[in-house]
């Protein structure tokens, strides 16, 4: 990752963790706690792609594992956010710009559900049965509700900062295959050029029979 990406990601992750621990964690809301850290990871992953999202997710999860009052095994949340960052990065839109707010909300909703289930699953493997006592269904529903409600205020702002802080690099990047990759972009340009260039030739071929009938 570039230096400016590392700096911005570090600042956003630390700020999100601070707000989540000192503010959101003290609200005593029913069910899960709003996961501001997850929203920041998803927003950055939708701009940086799967590799960047994976690194950012791992770093953010590791910070959450080490930050007090953490009461779970170190590396548990790092694994969850690493996978969520990679998965969200795979859904990165062209140029890192979402065409509709609904698509970003769907990504957040999926990440909220999967991350909660995965966190509980990893906890069960290491002997943490807290999710079983609280109720997994209630945790999933509350996590989905809180994260989707927070997403319109967090994810677009994070994506905007990521694009602005990265300069014109993200905006000018083409999706894989547009300029090389799978070659689809080159194929599309070839097809367009061929259609434009074949127009006059086709017209000439249609006129030839008429010219041949003239005495």
Image (cartoon, helix red, strand yellow):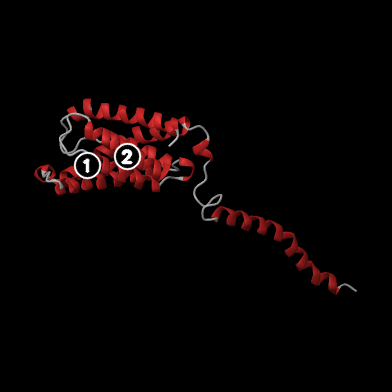
Instruction: Specify the quadrant that holds the N terminus.
Output: top left
The image position of residue 66, as x and y in percent, is: 22, 32
Q: How many marks?
A: 2
Instruction: Specify the quadrant that holds the C terminus.
Output: bottom right
Depicted 98 relative to depicted 215: above or below:
above
Mark closest to the chain's N terminus, 2 or 1: 2
Quadrant of residue 8 within the rendered picture:
top left
The image position of residue 9, as x and y in percent, is: 37, 32
Depicted 212 relative to depicted 183: above or below:
below
The image position of residue 137, as x and y in percent, is: 16, 47
Q: Say which of 169 and 23 sits in front.
A: 169
Residue at 44%, 31% (x, y): give it: 3
Q: CA distance from mark 2 to mark 1?
A: 12 Å
The image position of residue 38, as x and y in percent, is: 29, 38
Residue at 84%, 70% (x, y): give it: 211
Quadrant of residue 160 within the rendered picture:
top left
Residue at 80%, 69% (x, y): give it: 208
Numbered label attached to residue 76? 1
Quadrant of residue 144 within the rendered picture:
top left
Q: Residue furthest right?
A: 215
Q: What residue is shown with label 2?
A: 57
């Amino acid at each position: 990752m570039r230096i400016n990406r590392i700096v911005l990601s570090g600042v956003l992750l630390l700020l999100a963790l601070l707000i989540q621990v000192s503010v959101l964690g003290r609200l005593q809301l029913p069910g899960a706690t709003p996961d501001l850290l997850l929203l920041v990871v998803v927003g950055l992953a939708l701009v940086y792609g799967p590799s960047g999202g994976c690194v950012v997710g791992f770093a953010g999860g590791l910070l959450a594992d080490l930050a007090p009052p953490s009461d779970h095994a170190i590396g548990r949340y790092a694994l969850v956010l690493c996978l969520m960052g990679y998965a969200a990065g795979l859904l990165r839109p062209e140029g890192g710009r979402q065409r509709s707010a609904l698509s970003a909300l769907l990504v957040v909703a999926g990440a909220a559900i999967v991350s909660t289930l995965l966190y509980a699953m990893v906890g069960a493997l290491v002997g943490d049965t807290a999710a079983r006592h609280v109720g997994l269904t209630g945790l999933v529903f509350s996590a989905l509700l809180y994260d989707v409600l927070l997403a319109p205020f967090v994810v677009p702002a994070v994506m905007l900062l990521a694009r602005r802080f990265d300069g014109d690099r993200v905006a000018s990047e083409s999706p894989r295959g547009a300029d090389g990759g799978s070659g689809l972009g080159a194929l599309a340009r070839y097809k367009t050029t061929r259609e434009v260039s074949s127009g006059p030739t086709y017209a000439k071929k249609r006129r030839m029979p008429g010219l041949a009938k003239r005495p």
